[in-house]
Each structure stands twice: as structure tokens, then as C-alpha cells.
């Protein structure tokens, strides 16, 4: 088998800190799929630019599908690259609509550093919901903002899709992650779907900005094993400038999770010149450390992969000339969180 070079492995988060057994498991899959995956993503980007119908905007092909052999049904079942048309899901069914999902469900890892994340919470089936009331200046999916963009789907149909992966997810200690958009804008759909996942014995995660956390009762929170909470910056004025919304509801939700000892990861997007102020980072780090329930901090480097969406949607994009942070800048941000006793990556 022709394995990748160290620099190529690094693109997928496999490096000297990755457990040897996990590297060995990942090697075969990466070696078999990385070049085909790169081509598929390039084809997707080209096709999506040409699409007049903006109602479908997500990949049905997730290249890094699982730490499993390429012949596994978990890979082959979703290993095709295609873009559904409006109305194709659900197909041929007359059903009551429970919500909208902007991306069909597929098997994959959260984020790009998939090996470390797989070791932390297993492989995931990920569903992206439509709708977000925030207007983050660096958003790479502005096509998810409005509820008109999305595929109508029932909880029953979504659960049927999830059930296909139940055995594999259990074997790989994985589960369901619901992201967005902002999932809690459709909290009834989300809670029903999470409940179905729990009945299958799967781990559940919600990635949210927390603004609508008060929509969830304490009993609702029991259906969520892990909350990935995005904190964008510090200070209400700066937060409103960055997102258009106040920060306090997010912080209140974080405090509520801490009071109940709910597991939480903190996610922070590092944008040079916008969210990299050392004092702001320090305040966020101290807040997270004081909560006592933050298991992990994810420092996510800003990128320009969603820039073309802003242009095609006719939206003003103000970060045209902003470059992604360097590895050194990202490490400096992580160091601020680590100084408060947090695990930051």
C-alpha cells in the first residue's frame, strides 16, 4: 500500500500526536480515498457554482467516511457524489413535513482533523439544518440562513436514514451530530431526531450558538450527550458587530449547562484582525475555565472556502482580503486557552 507523505497526513490531522493504532487504521482509508475525494469536492464546487437552484447546497458525498475498509457498506452505501434536485427527498412520499435540512445525512468526521476527533467522540452521521438568525461576517454557509433553502424532511425519513448506520456507529463508538445553520431554530425537529438516535443507543451531539438554549427544557437536554457551543468573540458591542446579535443568551446557556454538569466543547473561529485580540481570547478562556464543564476547545482557523457563496447570493462580503491565520497564530490562540487549564486544539 502506498501511504501518504507526512505533509499529506497532516492535512487530515494525522501527526505525531495521533495514537499509532489510529494512524494505522486511517492510513488505508486515506490512501484509497484522498485523491478521489479531492476530485469529488472539486467537481462539487464547480457544479454548485453553476446551479440556478440554491435550495440544495450540501455534499451528499463525504470523502472521509469512516475508519473502516473501503469495501465496507458504510463507505460504499454513501460513496457516490451527487447533488439532489428540489423535491427529491423524500421521494414519492406524501408526508407531513417536520422541518428542513440543508444537507442530506452522510457518514463522516466532524471537522478536518478527523483522526483526533474520531478518537474523542467516534465517527458521526452529521445532519445540517436550515435557518440561522445570526449574520457572522465570516460565515462560510450563508446559504443556510433562510428557511427557504433546504430539503423538506420528516423525522421518520431522517430516522430511517440514520438507522442504516446504526450497527457501524455502535462498533465505532460514534453517533449523530446535528449542526446548521442554527439547529435550535428547528428545536422540535432536532429533539425528535435526537430522541430517535438515543433509542438506537447512539451518542448525540448538537453544534449550536446557544442563543435559543432557553427553548430546551432540562428534560430536553437529557437527549443531548454533548453540546458544541460556538463563542464568536467577547464583549456585547464586538459580538453585535461580528454576528448582529447579543452575546448574553449564549453565555447564559453555557452557564446553565455548567450548572447541570452537561458536557460541552467550545468552538472558536480565529479570524486575523477580527477575533484574534489577546484580551478577548483571554476573557473567553477564563469564562470557559470557570464553567468547569468544558472538555475541549476547538480553535478553528478562518478560511475563504465560502466566499463564492456570498457573491452568488448577492451579499456584501467584507473579509475579501483577510488571510487565514498561520499555524503560529493558531498555536498562540490555543496557548491562551491552555494557560487557563483547558485542552485546546
Image: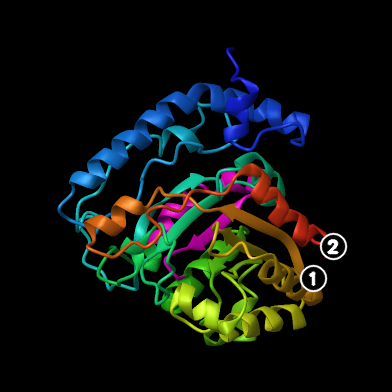
Sequence-wise, the earlier of marks 1 and 2 is: 1
- Report the disc number at residue 341: 2
Is any atom of residue 260 visible in this view? no
- Report the disc number at residue 237: none
- Report the disc number at residue 289: 1
Q: Secondary structure at mark 2?
A: loop
93 and 37: which one is in front? 37
The structure residue drawn at horizontal position 51% and vertical position 38%, both measured from the top left corner, is: 65
- Quarter of image, res 205: bottom right
Position of the N terminus, as image quadrant, is: top right
- Classed neighbour count for the residue bearing mark 2: other residues with Cα under 10 Å, few (<14), some (14–19), many (≥20): few
Which range of residues does the magenta coloring cover? 157-182
Placement of 168 over or under 87, stated as above or below: above
Q: CA distance from mark 1 to mark 2?
A: 7 Å
Placement of 259 over or under 107, stated as above or below: below
Q: Residue furthest left?
A: 52
User: In the displayed structure, does residue 9 sit left or right of residue 294?
Assistant: left
User: In the displayed structure, does residue 79 sit left or right of residue 87?
Assistant: right
Is residue 46 in the magenta section?
Answer: no
The structure residue drawn at horizontal position 45% and vertical position 53%, both measured from the top left corner, is: 322
Residue 176: x percent and y percent? 55, 57
Placement of 267 over or under 303, stated as above or below: below
Amino acid at each position: 500500500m502506498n501511504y501518504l507523505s507526512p505533509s499529506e497526513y497532516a492535512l487530515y490531522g494525522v501527526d505525531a500526536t495521533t495514537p499509532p493504532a489510529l494512524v494505522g487504521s486511517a492510513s488505508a482509508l486515506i490512501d484509497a480515498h484522498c485523491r478521489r475525494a479531492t476530485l469529488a469536492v472539486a467537481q462539487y464546487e464547480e457544479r454548485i457554482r453553476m446551479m440556478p437552484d440554491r435550495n440544495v447546497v450540501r455534499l451528499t458525498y463525504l470523502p472521509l467516511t469512516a475508519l473502516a475498509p473501503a469495501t465496507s457498506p458504510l463507505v460504499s452505501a454513501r460513496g457516490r457524489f451527487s447533488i439532489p434536485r428540489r423535491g427529491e427527498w423524500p421521494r414519492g412520499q406524501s408526508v407531513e413535513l417536520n422541518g428542513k435540512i440543508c444537507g442530506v445525512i452522510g457518514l463522516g468526521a466532524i471537522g478536518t482533523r478527523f483522526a483526533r476527533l474520531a478518537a474523542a467522540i467516534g465517527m458521526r452521521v452529521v445532519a445540517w439544518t436550515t435557518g440561522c438568525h445570526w449574520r457572522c461576517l465570516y460565515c462560510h454557509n450563508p446559504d443556510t440562513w433562510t428557511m427557504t433553502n433546504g430539503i423538506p424532511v420528516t423525522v421518520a425519513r431522517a430516522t430511517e436514514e440514520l438507522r442504516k448506520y446504526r450497527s457501524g456507529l455502535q462498533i465505532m463508538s460514534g453517533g449523530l451530530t446535528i449542526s446548521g445553520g442554527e439547529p435550535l431554530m428547528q428545536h422540535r425537529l432536532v429533539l425528535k431526531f435526537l430522541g430517535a438516535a438515543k433509542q438506537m443507543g447512539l451518542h448525540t451531539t448538537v453544534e449550536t450558538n446557544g442563543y435559543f438554549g432557553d427553548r430546551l427544557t432540562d428534560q430536553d437536554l437529557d437527549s443531548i450527550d454533548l453540546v458544541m457551543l460556538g463563542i464568536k468573540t467577547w464583549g456585547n458591542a464586538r459580538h453585535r458587530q461580528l454576528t448582529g446579535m447579543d452575546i448574553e443568551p449564549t453565555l447564559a446557556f453555557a452557564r446553565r449547562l455548567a450548572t447541570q454538569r452537561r458536557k460541552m466543547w467550545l468552538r472558536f473561529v480565529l479570524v486575523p484582525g477580527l477575533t484574534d485580540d489577546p484580551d478577548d481570547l483571554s476573557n473567553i478562556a477564563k469564562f470557559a475555565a470557570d464553567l468547569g464543564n468544558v472538555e475541549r476547545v476547538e480553535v478553528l482557523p478562518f478560511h475563504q472556502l465560502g466566499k463564492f457563496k456570498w457573491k452568488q447570493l448577492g451579499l456584501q462580503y467584507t473579509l475579501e482580503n483577510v488571510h487565514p491565520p498561520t499555524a503560529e497564530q493558531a498555536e498562540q490562540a490555543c496557548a491562551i486557552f491552555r494557560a487557563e487549564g483547558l485542552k485546546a486544539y
